[in-house]
Amino acid sequence: MNASIPLADAAPAAQAPLSDWLHWLEAQHPRTIELGLERVGQVADRLGLRQPFSGTIISIAGTNGKGSSVALLQAALQAAGLSVGAYTSPHLEHYAERIRIDGQPVSEAALTDAFARIESARQGIPLTYFEFGTLAALLIFRESVLDVLLLEVGMGGRLDAVNCVDADIALITNIALDHQEWLGEDIETIAGEKAGILRVGRPVVFSGAHCPGAIVEEARRLGCPLYRRGEAFNVRIETDGWSWHGPHASLENLPHPALAGTHQIDNAAGVLMVLSLLEGRGVPREGVRQALTQVRHPGRFERFVVNTGDGAHEIILDVAHNPDGARALAETLAQHPPRSGGRTLALCAVLTDKDADGLVEPLLTQVAQWVVCGLSGPRGDEGQRVQDALLRQGVTQIAHEARVEDGYNRALTLLGPDDRLVVFGSFLTVAEVRKRVISHAG
């Protein structure tokens, strides 16, 4: 795509607060998506970021499960005593969450210094908000002593800014329909975009249930060893745990991941395959067990208890924002039902480019009453699309509020004694509610 991103006013000083830099980036091109590696690659070259890194680079692509896989990888590698840099997006509360070293967000000073150096190097080359962040992560990681770098692909793979550096190992989680206007209208086309992170002769792990032909073909073309579930590795789910069987080793009696949902075992299985490929940096069994039991990932079936006027209520936050994520959420809700006699209420707010019908349909059997809300911002939806999707499904128990804040307050008034509330639809939705839940959680 051509570089159509507008230039903006002068950047803040290097010593300016991070909030000033973020406001400046947002003012230049608010939430702009501009796929392509030419611009970001030029700036990366000027910063020396395309030279080999000292640590092993693992790039993680897929439709859902990327963030959970990064969290599991990070936990396991740290349990083995390795130094780990992780880049993920978006964030829930603070921008620095996107760039972590050994589990801790980097400092605001490190971020503003990186932004200032990128601004100096780009010399008028337009960059998006995401591209600035990606280069900042790589710059910070370049100057840190790290054993492993975990880079989550933002969208697609082939043309995503993360793909301006070469992965030593590629992990692709699953492929589903999302961002079709950018990635293509069918699974194979989208898979072809995800496969863009593969590099000649370097291994790729696919952790989803069904590996699309486009990934198989690209791995064959590039001579990449392909490790896919059902062939190179398998899992066996048991009553009180699960087992993993790989090409050269097996792990028995593993604990279920602390992240709720059967789909998290799929993510964990792919992570174990990746860990087995790290030559000389294997993670011992106890490190794996520790990672599975201690891993945390905010916004993924994250559960709180909030005390309201009529008692304590469970609030579940989940960033599911596409049909595949909604199906996983519905399955996990069924596995963790409300208290006897209680109902599940849902608060949902989405972005305009999301499939509202596909998002709500999997949850119809789990949700008794709905609150739909509008989201602010250029891609924010007013809530009418979700309401219309529910009406088409015959749902009548719908409350509609203009803002997520108002929707959350309304939902609290609708909760009966044993009811619970699930909040989903967008990272923005979850982030807004999470701030309020944390301040009131008991």
Image (cartoon, rainbow, N blue to C red):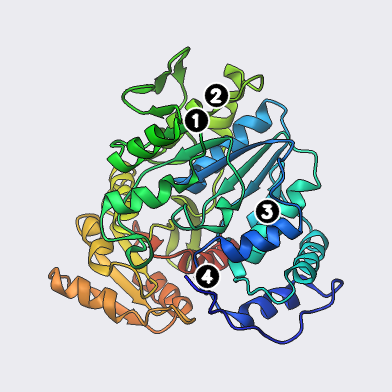
Looking at the picture, tell me which residue is in the foreground, 146 or 100: 146
| Of marks 4 and 3, the one in the foreground | 3
Amino acid under disc 2: Leu
Image position of 131 (left or right of 219)? right
Amino acid under disc 1: Pro
The answer to whether residue 339 is visible is no
Q: Which residue is mark 2?
A: 277
Q: Earlier in the sequence, mark 2 or mark 4?
A: 2
Looking at the picture, tell me which residue is in the foreground, 131 or 291: 131
Q: Is residue 16 above or below residue 334?
A: below
Q: Earlier in the sequence, mark 2 or mark 3?
A: 3
Q: Of helix, strand and loop, which one carries label 1?
A: loop
Q: Is residue 128 above or below residue 73?
A: below
Q: Which residue is mark 4?
A: 432
Q: Which residue is mark 3?
A: 99
Q: Earlier in the sequence, mark 1 or mark 4?
A: 1
Q: Which residue is mark 1?
A: 203
Check contact, mark 1 vs mark 2: CB within 8 A.
yes
| Of marks 2 and 4, the one in the foreground | 2
Amino acid under disc 4: Glu
CA distance separating discs 2 and 3: 24 Å
Q: Position of residue 350 (x, y in %)?
A: 38, 71
Looking at the picture, tell me which residue is in the foreground, 433 or 351: 351
The answer to whether residue 185 is visible is yes
Q: Residues within 10 Å of mark 2 (few under 14, many from 20)?
A: some
Q: Position of residue 300 (x, y in %)?
A: 46, 50
Q: Is residue 278 above or below residue 70?
A: above
- Quadrant that contains the C terminus: bottom right
